[in-house]
Amino acid sequence: MTQTAEPQGDTAEAHTSLWRNRNFMLLWCGQGAGTLGPRVALVVLPVLALDTLHAGTFQVSLLTSLGWLPYLLFSLPAGVVADRLDQRKIMIFCDVARLLLILSVPLIALMGRLSLWYLYAVVGVSGILTVLFTVAYRSQLPKLVSSAQLVDGNGKLGMCESLAEVAGPGLGGALVGLVGSSRTLYANVLTYALSALTLGMIRVPKSAQSPPAGASRVSFKAAMGEGLSFVRGQVILRKLLICTSVSNFFVTAASSIAVTFLLRDLHASATAVGLVFTLGSVGGLVTGAFARRIAARVGSARIIWVSMLLPGPLYFLMPLSQPGWGVVLYAVGLAALSANSTMFNTGAISYRQLVCPRELLSRVSAVYLWITYGVIPLGSLFGGALATGVGLRPTLWVCALGMWSASLFVVFSPLRKMRDVSIPEAALA
């Protein structure tokens, strides 16, 4: 596949640090705070349901399910909305709306009128807004940086997501212990306020401010189908979609039994479990920080399949881990998975942003969210059911093999014959 030469301006900008790009830094802070908020809420709201409303195990599990359900139901419509409206304003709207929803919970609790059904409504509506926020921010980056800086930008955004995944639950748990679950939600409100403030300060270039011409030329229903049609017509996009979905399925299956395995089979303490997951996040943080240099050395296309293939053998350290110091093996396997996830997502999302027409980008991103996040509840059920039938350690062996097998979809694809992503003429224009 022939590579298209990049303009000299883009080549020069590729070596310019994004830390000096005001718009990118504001997006980075806004996306980080907007991602941290839901992670904190995932811990605080179930604790609130248990302690204040005396909910049962199944009732609490519904809160988690309602948090993921919007990805199945609303991803495709969210993609059309994000393609037709100003994405930065959408993100700000989502932040303000989530802020008001979360703020209402402690206020209603103070009045003594909080109910489980109200929590369900807050989680469900917040989930819809989170889907819309996620679709919008993934289409915002190409407006603020050059095509040569996309890998670096996506790497830093991915690093921020990894940090939020680790810090969110830990911060939520620590604050619950200090001030209680209801008051902790005020900190959650602050994350959304910070996100809205920083996003409001972004100055999008005039050429990228308005929705692309023709974005609303077809009906809403037909517009949802255009994203699916585009993905079906692109062999690499199809392979990336399948690879991500298979990986997410088995990663979620392993995650659903990880804490149980560490506590019951390895007899690890709660502190040790927290340390394992903290150390496991290091891989994602490091690869996110050095994504641009790694992709430049390996190749922006080649890194996609290399990042899926090479860390695979380390996944088997998780089922090989043993009590005592052997628990470190689980942390090493988790760090390899974290590194794979951040680097693969950086390369795959950058590829998507380069090859998709601007007027389709949000809808194509929505297709990925719809399918790749839609398998997460299924993976969780699979992990729990298999562990019940054959045991925790055998299930982890199956999951490790499944996670590594996902690499086959990108290894046996046109990406294997490419070093760098070719930038279409339309993207350069």
Image (cartoon, rainbow, N blue to C red):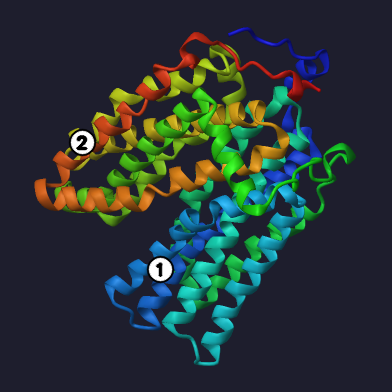
Q: Position of residue 128 (x, y in %)?
A: 56, 61
In screen coordinates, is 43 left or right of 315? right
Q: Is residue 181 visible?
A: no
Residue at left offset 70%, top offset 26%: 149
Residue at mark 1 to residue at mark 2: CA–CA distance: 28 Å
Q: Amino acid at mark 2?
A: Val
Instruction: Give the numbered dot on residue 356.
Output: none
In screen coordinates, is 346 left or right of 400? right
Residue at left offset 82%, top offset 52%: 201
Sequence-first tag of 1 and 2: 1
Pick the residue in front: 287 or 132.
132
Give the class, few, some or many, for how many residues have Cα within 10 Å of label 1's Cα (few <14, many ≥20). many
Q: Position of residue 228 (x, y in %)?
A: 54, 39
Q: Amino acid at mark 1?
A: Leu
Residue at left offset 24%, top offset 49%: 382
**Label 2: which secondary element:** helix
Pick the residue in front: 125 or 53.
125
Residue at left offset 35%, top offset 53%: 377
**Which quadrant would the N terminus be assigned to in this image?**
top right
Above or below, 297 against 155 in this view is above
**Which quadrant would the C terminus be assigned to in this image?**
top right
Q: Position of residue 87 (x, y in %)?
A: 73, 50
The residue at which mark 1 appears reads as: 63
Q: Position of residue 222 (x, y in %)?
A: 62, 47
Q: Is residue 147 visible?
A: yes
To which quarter of the image does residue 341 belong?
top left
Above or below, 173 against 344 in this view is below
**Label 1: which secondary element:** helix
The residue at which mark 2 appears reads as: 398
